[in-house]
Amino acid sequence: MKEKYFKRPLHTPAHLFINDHYYFITAGCYHKRAYLDSDAKKKFLYKIICEELNRYFTMLYGWTLLDNHYHILIKPRDAFLLPKLIQAIHSKSAITINKIDKRHGRKVWHDYWDKCIRDQEDFYTKLNYIHLNPIRHGYVDDLTNYRFSSYHSYFKEKGEEGLKVIMRNHPISKLEPEDDF
């Protein structure tokens, strides 16, 4: 049985927690600064994300890491632990990013946003948004040239034609206005 729970912290939007359900998460660096400005920092953040997702029994379905934010598509067994999961990712990554930059105690992460996925259409639309994000932000013109994304895993699994079908059938133009971070 899936549990549903609404949580509304003071001055923030309500969070809907449903166990074993998909979530689209976006997290941004403080003041939109490019604190993830090297391959080493992105690799480390990805490692921390995977370790913490494993620790919290959460599956990763899609991801992309950019210089000042990231997106992940996950399915937590216990959705009530989402705030703790994100807090763990952010605190561990901030400590290391600050060590690399020799900036002890600097605030790295601003906040995160979570969106409970409604259906398969919503899932694939968010997955396409995640994969197309490096193009939207001008990092690359071709997704095969961007390393910090789950695009390559899906390319191996579905092939080029399979990904074209997903992109065509679930365009990011169907996103709601507040989804455009």
Image: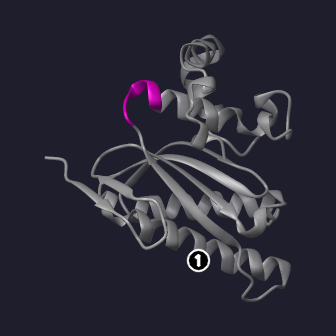
Classified by dominant secondary structure, the portion drawn in magenta counts as: helix
Apparent side of residue 1 relative to residue 121 in the rendered image (left or right): left
92 vs 34: above or below: below
Residue at (33%, 44%) from the top-left corner? 21
Q: Is residue 141 magenta?
A: no
Q: Position of residue 80 (x, y in %)?
A: 31, 63
Q: Farthest residue to the bottom: give it.
A: 104
Nearer to us in this view, 136 or 148:
136
Q: Identify the element where label 1 is drawn.
A: helix
Nearer to us in this view, 129 or 145:
129
Q: Position of residue 162 (x, y in %)?
A: 57, 14
Q: Quadrant of residue 117?
A: top left
The residues colored magenta run 118-122
Q: Position of residue 124 (x, y in %)?
A: 50, 27
Name the colour scheme.
one colour
Apparent side of residue 37 relative to residue 83 in the rendered image (left or right): right
Nearer to us in this view, 30 or 147:
30
69 vs 169: above or below: below
Q: Quadrant of residue 135?
A: top right
Residue at (76%, 30%) from the top-left corner? 143
Residue at (50%, 63%) from the top-left corner? 51
Residue at (53%, 56%) from the top-left corner? 113
Apparent side of residue 25 relative to residue 152 in the rendered image (left or right): left
Apparent side of residue 128 relative to residue 106 in the rendered image (left or right): left
Q: Position of residue 14 (x, y in %)?
A: 40, 59
- Residue to which mark 1 is pinned: 91
